[in-house]
Image: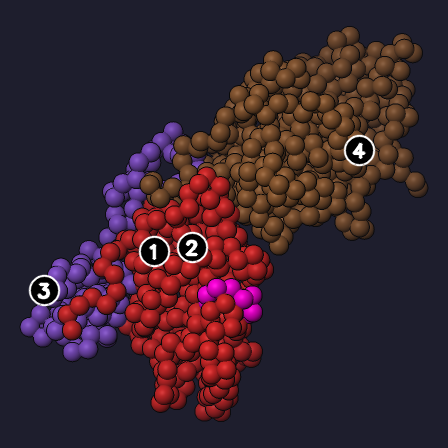
Amino acid sequence: MSKLTIPQEEIMSSGHLACQGCAGALAMRYMLKVFGKKTMLAVPACCWSVIDGPWPYSAVSVPLFHTAFETAAITASGLKAGLVAQGINDVNVVAWAGDGGTFDIGFQAISGAAERNDDILYVVYDNEAYMNTGIQRSSATPYGAWTTTTPANHPKDRPKKDLVEIIAAHRVPFVATASVAYPEDLIKKFEKAKNTKGFKLIHIFAPCPTGWKMAPELSIESARLAVQTRVFPVYEVENGVHYKLNINVKNPKPVGEYLKIQGRFRHLKEDDYKVIQENVDREWELLMRKVETFK
Amino acid sequence: MKHSDKDVKIKGASDMPEMPASLGSMAHNKTASWRNLKPVIDESKCIKCFICWKFCPDAAIDFIDENTSPKINYDYCKGCGICAHECPVKCIDMVEEER
Amino acid sequence: MKKVILGDHAVSYGALLSRVQTIAAYPITPQTLIVERLSEMTANGELDAIFTKVESEHSAMASTVGSSAAGARAFTATSAQGLALMHEMLHWAAGARLPIVMANVNRAMAPGWTIWTDQNDSLSARDVGWMQVYCQNNQEVLDSIILGYKVSEQVDLPTMVILDAFVLSHTAEGVDIPDIKKVDEFLPPYKPEIKMDINDPRSFGALTSPDVYMEFRYKMQQAMDKAKKVIVEEGKKFGEMFGREYGLIEEYKTEDADTILIASATVASTARAVIDELREKGEKVGLVRIRVFRPFPTEEIIKVLEGRKKVVVIDRNISFGKTGIFFDEVKGAFYNSKGNKPPMFGYIAGLGGRDVTPKVIREIVEDALNKDKPESEIIWKGVKL
Ligand SMILES: Cc1ncc(C[n+]2csc(CCOP(=O)(O)OP(=O)(O)O)c2C)c(N)n1
Ligand code: SF4
Ligand code: SF4
Ligand SMILES: [Mg+2]
C-alpha cells in the first residue's frame, strides 16, 4: 500500500494564489508531473491567470504565456509552430483554459486547431462557471445551478454543452474527460496525450469551492460524487469513433447526493432533482450505446 | 535578468524587462496566513498511503520516503482540509490555529 | 532582378526575402493574393516556413503572437474588417513587445460593404503600439517588409506595412527584387534575448498592478522614440546596400516652397505631378509625404513646416466628430513649437476608394492658395450634396 500512485516530481510550486481547495490548481499540479519541464503553457484569462501569480512571479517552472481570453488553442498552436520552425521538436505545448474560455468565447479557435489537428494538448479545467469574474454562468454551467447571472429564482434552464462530443466530431486523435478525484486515470490520460501526435483535449472536472458555495475540503468528494452519480462520466474517444468508458459506475448513487453538498444547488426541490436524475440517466444511456457500438 | 526563488524588488523601469516577463517564483509567497484550521497528522495512525500528499492542491505536503509519514509544510498549507477529509484512516485532525 | 508585380505579390516577396519562419493568415479582399502566393511559396519549398491556415484574423494574430513569443520570425497580412477583428491581439503583440511584421491593405470599413481603399482601418489601430508605414509604390512595399523586421527586432515593437487597396495591391509595377543573399547580409536571423524557452522558464504577461503597469508603458514609448532613430539609420543603410533610401518623411521641392502639401501613401505619389504642374505655373509649392505615421515624425514635420505661408493636408480618412487624422496630428505637433505656425487647411478626399486624381489634388491646392485661412476645420473635397 505504500507506493506513490502518481509521479513524485513537483513543477508547480506552492505559494500560488488559488483559493483553498481549488481543484483547478490541483489539476495543473498533476499535468506538470507528467509533462515535465519540456513543456510550454498558453493560459488565457481565467482563474489561472491569477493563480500563477502577479508579475514579476510565476508558480510554474515552465514557460507560460498569458494570452487573451479566447485564444488559448491558437496561441498554443502558434507557439508550437514557432518552435518547430526553429527546429525545436521535443517541447510539448499545452493550452490551459477554464470552461468559459473553452465552451464559450474560445470555442471557434479550438475548433480551428482541432480541425487542423495542430499538435497541442488542450486542457480545460471545468469549474462550471466564470469564476475569475465572480461566478457568472457559462455554457458549461449545469442545469439548475445558481450563478450570479442565473439567480436562484431563475437558475440555469439549459443543460451543459457536450464539449467532448463536439471535439470528437472533429475526429481528433484523442479526447477524454477526467476528474481530479481519480488522479491515476488522469495521469494515464496525460501520458497518453503526451505520446500522441496531433490535437488532444482533456476535459477535467475541477470543483471550485468558492464558486460552488461549498466547504473547501469537499472539492475531491464532490468530484468523486459527480462520477459516482453518473453526472460526469469518465471516458475517452480515440480518432473520434473509438469510445472507451474509463470508470464504470455499476451502482450509481442518486444525483441528490452530489447536489445537496453544494450551495449552488440549494434552491432545488425534489422535483428538480427528478428532472436532473432523468437527464443524467438519459445521457448515460446514450453514452453506453456509443461505448458498446463504437469500440 | 535571472529567475530567482526570492522576493523580487523593483525600483522602476530601469530594473524591469521590456515586457512583463517573470523574474521570480511564487514560492517566495508563504500562504500560511490564509489558514484558520491547521491539519495535524497523527503519525501513529498514519498508514503511509500518501493519499493526502496526492490531493493537496497547494503541493504543501512533502513526501519524504515510503516508510515515513508525509510532512505538512506549514509555510504554505492554506488549511483547506482536503487532506483530512480524504485520509482513509482519518488520522489528520484540523485544529484551531493559534494566533 | 526586376519584375513587374502586383502590390500584394510585393508583400509576399518581402516576406520570402525576410525568411519569415511562420505565417498565419486569413483571406480578405484585397489581401487574398498575398496569402495565395505565400501558400504557393511554402508549398513548393521556395519559402521554408510553417503556414497555419487559421479560422479567423483574431486567430491569425494570436498565432503570430505565439510563434513570435517562441522566438520565430512571424508574419501575417490582413485588411479592414480583418484588422478590426484582430484589434485585441494587436495590443497583445505590442504589449508583449514582439517584432511581428504585418501587411495591411488599406480598405474602407463597412457598412456599407466596400473593398476599396481608405485609411480608416489602419488609423483605428493608431494607438495599439505598432509602428505604421504608409507606402507609395510596390517597391516600397517590398522594401518596407524587410526594413520592418530590421527595425522591429531592434526596438521590440511590431510593424504594420500599409498599402492602398487596388491602387497598389492589384496594380502591376516594376519592382527590383533584391538578391536574397544580400538581404541576408542586411537582415540577420532573429535572436531575441528573452523568449518562451524551456531552458529559461518564465511567465509572460502576468497580472501587472498599478504599481508597475505604467513603467511597462513608459518603456513602449521609449522604444517608439528609439525607433525614430533606428528607422532613419536603417533606411540609410538600406539605401547604401540597395540604392533606395527611406526615412520618416519624404520631401519634394520643399526647399523654397511657400505652401506645403502633406499627403501619404499613393495620394502622395500622385501629388508629385501636381506639384510639378503648379510649379510650372509659378506657384511655390512643395510636398511632404508622411511615410511613417507611428512613431510620428513630430520634429521633422515642425522643421519643414515652420515659417511656411500655408500647409495643406489631404486625408483619406476621417476621425468622426473631429477632422482628418493626419491633419489633426500635424496640427497637434505644432502646438508647443516656438516658431511661426502657418495656417493649415485640412481636406477629406477619396474615402471608400473614390479616385484622388491629379485634378482633385490640384483643385485642393488651388482652393487653399486662393484663401487666407480655412473656413472650417474640415473641407470636404468632392462630396456630392
Ligand atoms: C474578451 C474578454 N471578455 C471578457 C473578459 C473577462 N473575463 C476574464 S476571465 C473571465 C471568465 C473566465 O471563466 P473561465 O474560462 O471559466 O475560467 P475560470 O475563471 O472559471 O477559471 C471573463 C469573463 C476578458 N478577459 N476578455
Ligand atoms: S475561484 Fe474557484 S477556480 Fe478560481 S481559484 Fe478559487 S477555487 Fe480555484
Ligand atoms: S489542509 Fe489543504 S493545503 Fe493544507 S496540507 Fe491539507 S490539503 Fe494541503
Ligand atoms: Mg470556469
Dot label at residue B68: 3
- Judging by colour alone, the chain drawn in red in this rendered image is A
* Image position of B88 with respect to C325: above or below: below
Q: Quadrant of the N terminus of chain A?
A: bottom left
- Judging by colour alone, the chain drawn in brown in this rendered image is C
**Residue C288, quarter of picture:** top right
**Residue A223, quarter of picture:** bottom left
Rendered residue at 60%/18% (across/down): C238
- How far is disc 3 from disc 1 in space, using C-alphas? 27 Å
Helix, strand or loop at label 3? It is loop
Residue most toward the left? B44
> Which chain contains the residue that carries disc 4?
C
Counting from the top left corner in percent of width and height, residue A186 is at 35, 68
- How far is disc 2 from disc 3 in space, using C-alphas? 35 Å
Which one is in front, C359 or A20? Answer: C359
Dot label at residue A35: 1
Q: Is residue A174 magenta?
A: yes
Residue, disc 4: C171
Rendered residue at 76%/28% (across/down): C4
Q: Is mark 2 within 8 Å of ligand 1?
A: no
Q: Is residue C257 magenta?
A: no
Do residues under tags 2 and 1 come within 8 Å of each other at their CB atoms? yes
Counting from the top left corner in percent of width and height, residue C379 is at 84, 32
